[in-house]
Amino acid sequence: QVQLVESGGGLVQAGGFLRLSCAASGSISNIQTMGWYRQAPGKQRELVAGITRAGDTMYAVSMKGRFTISRDNAQSTVYLQMNSLKPEDTAIYYCAAAKYDSAWYAMDYWGKGTSVTVSS
């Protein structure tokens, strides 16, 4: 099993930035892909960004250029740098991990989420 714990959420003004972190523990050798999803109030959960063990990344169109996903050398922590935040970025952000490469939409493990609120 894999456990994922997010941190770094909070309240920020529009135009500001936040850096989310997700620490993985347990059977981390099983993890190939890691990513961030978000769910805004009244909306479906959506993929924000993902990164493979090799460092290949993908981003949702609306986040590309503002958000950057990265993964540490030990590959047990993934980060999401969020710049130029907008009120519409307000959501619960979830860390996710998958056993397969580039499995952006087939995550096997989920964190409990961290709240991000962007005020206008």
Image (tube, rainbow, N blue to C red):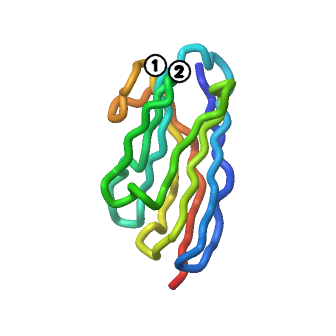
Q: Position of residue 113 (x, y in %)?
A: 56, 49
Q: Position of residue 109 (x, y in %)?
A: 50, 30
Question: Gap between marks 1 and 2, in whole Å?
Answer: 5 Å
Q: Nearer the viewer, residue 97 or 59?
A: 59
Q: What secondary structure is found at the residue carrying circle 1?
A: loop
Q: Which mark, residue 31?
A: 2
Considering only vertical position in the picture, is 92 above or below 103? below
Q: Amino acid at mark 1?
A: Lys
Count neighbours of disc 2 (C-alpha within 10 A) and say few if under 14, some if 14 to 19, many if 20 or more: many
Count neighbours of disc 1 (C-alpha within 10 A) and say few if under 14, some if 14 to 19, many if 20 or more: some
Q: Residue at x 34, y 51 (%)?
A: 60
Q: Nearer the viewer, residue 43 or 18?
A: 18
Q: Quadrant of the N terminus?
A: top right
Considering only vertical position in the picture, is 97 above or below 86? above
Q: Residue at x 33, y 34 (%)?
A: 105
Q: Position of residue 110 (x, y in %)?
A: 51, 36
Residue at the bottom extreme of this rendering: 120
In the image: residue 104, left or right of residue 95: left
Q: Which mark, residue 72?
A: none
Whether residues under marks 1 and 2 lie with C-beta atoms below 8 angstroms apart, the answer is: yes
Q: Which mark, residue 99?
A: 1
Considering only vertical position in the picture, is 101 above or below 82? above
